[in-house]
Image (tube, helix red, strand yellow):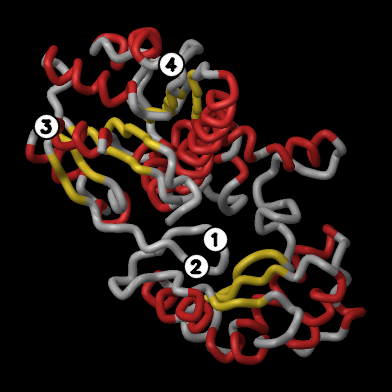
Amino acid sequence: MGPLSDLRIIEFDGLGPVTFAGMLLADMGARVLRLTRASSAGAAAFQEVGGAVMHRGRTAVAVDLKSPGDRERVLDLLARADALIEGFRPGVMERLGLGPADVARRAPALVYGRVTGWGQSGPLADQVGHDINYLALSGALHAMGEPDRPPRPPLNLVGDYAAGAQGLVVGVLAGVLEARRTGVGRVVDSAMTDGAAQLMGLFSGLAARGLWSEARGANLLDGGAPFYRCYACRDGGFVAVGALEPRFYAALLAGLGLEPDAAPQHDPTRWPALHELFASVFATADRDVWAERFAGTEACVTPVLTPSEAREHPHNVARGTFDARGFPRPAPVFDGARAQPDPADSMSLREALAVWDA
């Protein structure tokens, strides 16, 4: 039983961050009902991409939100819930008669969680967009990629999931804690642009002190430093180097067979030459040869694994990071035991009400 087992959440089905947030909450034991709606075959198929993982641990309930009867039953469910999460564009829930004011009349203690790209207010609130657009406007995307190439999006991990979904989950849980104390819920406005900007807080602070340049690939953590980047190996594989601390850097040099005086660490004027030197050395051997050479050292050198290789790595196997199908299991782990969520299932709206009243 997870730590959120006494929490009841209504999830209005969508894509991206709201789905990931529902998965996180269910993985931690919350009782999550995912309300789905009729859609075209193409849209339905797209929504099921990744569903075996993204929809796990919760029940799907088909509803017609334009039906007064179904809308009334949804309000009955919300009156029994601690929170709802939704990811529609601003105004959609209000037009359905399920906006925060509508719900508060029936469920004043409910926490109303909303996740969008631009947020519920501002001149772009009604505009369409995707993860890459929200990262672009937050300033985060500009910092990613090679200096002589266009910025490269980091999949949709940063905007959808780190900035949007995890921000939503933290906000909803904080709201529930307060509502249980006060009896009054809140509206949580999780905008991916806000969250991505917040994730850049460290770099904003460094820039204010003159320690971070807006030039891409010229800084400590963006691939500019030769001791914090990836290198190609003889066989076409890659290694990741993260030798930030002086003793880790010394271990890196030792593993590469280089003398400390030949490669001073914190002289940015020497970094381009060190890039070339390290690259030439790493290119002399295969990826797994380097992985074996650096194993057990403090050099912070690891092989860059493909997703299929990651599933077979002994560390991930030992921790049970992936299940037998290769799907990632819930994280974090509580008390040394990893949750084993039930697969997604479905029921009717009347059945859902009966279950929640049981």
The answer to whether marks 1 and 3 mark residues whose Cβ atoms lie closer than 8 Å is no
The answer to whether marks 1 and 2 mark residues whose Cβ atoms lie closer than 8 Å is yes
Give the labeled residue for mark 3: 39
Give the labeled residue for mark 1: 334
Question: Disc 2 vs disc 3: which is toward the camera?
Answer: 2
| Percent x, y of residue 49 | 23, 50
Q: Which mark is residue 182?
A: none
Give the labeled residue for mark 4: 125
Give the labeled residue for mark 2: 337
Amino acid type of disc 3?
Ser
Amino acid type of disc 1?
Phe
The answer to whether marks 4 and 1 mark residues whose Cβ atoms lie closer than 8 Å is no
**Secondary-structure class at tag 1:** loop
> Vertical placement of 191 versus 322: above or below?
above
Residue ID at (20%, 41%): 60
Q: Is residue 325 left or right of residue 318?
A: left
Amino acid type of disc 2?
Ala
- Name, please, the residue furthest toward the left: 41
**Secondary-structure class at tag 4:** loop
